[in-house]
Image (spheres, rainbow, N blue to C red):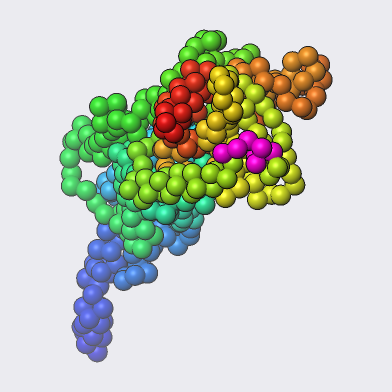
Amino acid sequence: MNTMRVRRDQRTGDDAGIPRGGQPASSERVGHRAGVRAEPGRAVPRGRAGDRARAGAGHDHICGASAPVRADQEARAGPPTVRPHLLGSLAALSASAAAIHFAVVFEHFAEYALYGVFFLVISWAQMIWPAVLLWRPSRLWLWLAIAGNAIVIAVYLGSRTVGLPFGPDVHHAEPAGALDVVSCVLEFGLIAGCAALLWRPSLADRPVAGRSAVARAASLVAVPAAVIAATTAVMTPGWAGPDGPAGMASRISAGMPSRSSPGTVQPGMGNMGTTDGRPDMRMYGATAPPTAGQVLGAARLIKETDASLKRYANVQAAFAAGYTYVLKTNGEEHLLYDGNNPGYQGLNPQDPSSLVYAINVPNHAPILLGAMFIMGDRQNGPQTGGGLTRWHSHLVTCVSGRQTIAGFGVQLRDRCNPATWRDTYTAQMLHVWVVPYPGGVFSDDLSTAATNAAAHAALAEHR
C-alpha cells in the first residue's frame, strides 16, 4: 500500500512538471528569465501577464521598477538589457531638436515676436523632456512627447504648404530648408520610438549580448553621438546655408539698418541710420525668393494700383477725394487719406492709404509717382509678392513737442511731451510706384536722388 502511494505521488509530481527534488521546473525556468528566484511551490505567471510583470508595467513607469516581491524573496541581478540604449537614443533625438530650435530662436524673435516665443517654448520643452525621461520614465511622459512633437511637425507642415494664418507672412508658404528637414526627422524618430515603447514595453527589457565593459559603453553612446554629430554638422554654414543661424542673421541685418553706426547708408533705404540705438526704419516679412504664384500676385497688385491711380494724375483730384493730410520730405509730397472710411486702410489698390507726388519739378505741376498702403495699428502687411513686397515702418520720436519721423525730420500733427514720450514705430507701410523708380516697383528708398530720378523718368515717358 505504501509503495503504491509513493509511486502515485511521484507520477502526480511528474505530470505537474515538478522534479523529484520537489522544485517546480517550469517555475524555476520562468523565475530565472525574470531575474528572480521562484518561491518554492509558487508558479511565476506566464504569457502577457508574465511579460508585464517582468517589464515592470504593472504601474505607470516604463521599465523603471520591478514588480513587487515578498520580503522573503531573494532578488538576483538579471542580464543587461537594451533599456539604457533606447532611452538614451530618445533623449538624444529630443536634445538635438532642441539645439536646432535654440540656434534660431533669436532670429525668429527679430522677425516676429510670436514666432520667437513659440521657438523658445518648444526649445526648452525638448531640452527638459529627456532629463525627466532618464530620471523617471513613464507612459504619460512618452505620450506628452508624441503629442508635443506632433504639434510642432503639424505647424511646420502648415508653414511650408499653405502658410500660417498669422504673422508677417500670412498664408505664405515658406520653402523648406536643411535645418527644417533635419529637425522634423529627429522629431518623427522620437515619436516613433515613444510609440513603440508604449505599444510593447517589454522591448526595453530585451537582453543584449554579453560584451566587455568598454564595448557596452561604446554601444550605449553610439546612437546619441551620431545624432548629435549630424545635428551639429547640419547647423554649420556650409550645410545649412541661408537656413542656418548665420544665414538668417545675415538676412535680418540686410533687411534692417545698422543699430550701432548712426548715419550709415543702407542700400535701397535712403539715408536711414539709428536714433538712440534704434533703427530709423524697420523691415518686415520674408526675404526668400518669390514663387511663381507670388510673382503673379505682385504683377496683379501693380496693375490694379496703376489703373486706380490714373484718376489722381491731377493733385487737385486727390484733394477732392479726401487726401488732405500733407507730409513733405525730400522733394516728395505724401497725401494721406484723412477721412473716416476704413476701406482706405490696408492693402486695397482701389482706395490706397496715401498718394505720393514729386513736387520740386521746375515749371511743372506735381507728378504722381505712386501709392503707399498703410496697415492698421499692430497689423502685419500681407506679402502678396513674397520677398518682393516687404513692408516697413518708421521710428517716431518727440522733438520740440511734436511727433517727428526719425531720419527725415518730418513733423506729424500730433503733439507729445518730451519728458514722458517713448519712441515708437508707425504702422507698416508698402510703396507701389507707377513710374520707373530707382530700386524697383516696391522700393522703400525715399531719398532726394530717388525722387528726382523718378520724376525725370515720368516726364520722359510722356514726351
For the C terminus, give its image quadrant: top left
- Residue 313 in the figure: left or right of residue 60: right
Q: Residue furthest bottom?
A: 1
Image vertical order of residue 331 relative to residue 132, above or below? above
What secondary structure is the magenta-colored segment mainly?
helix
State which region is magenta: 313-319
Is residue 430 shown in magenta? Answer: no
For the N terminus, give its image quadrant: bottom left
Q: Which one is nearer the viewer's eye here, 300 or 31?
A: 300
Numbered circles on residues, count: 0
Q: Which one is nearer the viewer's eye here, 111 or 303?
A: 303
Residue 354 locus on image (x, y percent): 62, 37
Q: Which one is nearer the viewer's eye here, 338 or 43?
A: 338
Q: Which one is nearer the viewer's eye here, 239 or 257?
A: 257
- Name the residue at 65% across, 40% down: 318
Residue 295 locus on image (x, y percent): 37, 45
- Name the residue at 48% across, 60% down: 59
Viewer can see residue 156: no
- Name the residue at 29% across, 67% down: 27
- Name the residue at 69% across, 49% down: 342
Residue 257 locus on image (x, y percent): 50, 20
Image vertical order of residue 18 relative to residue 290, above or below? below
Image vertical order of residue 432 relative to residue 394, above or below? below
- Residue 297 in the figure: left or right of residue 4: right
Viewer can see residue 451: yes
Image vertical order of residue 87 relative to residue 396, above or below? below
Residue 421 locus on image (x, y percent): 77, 21
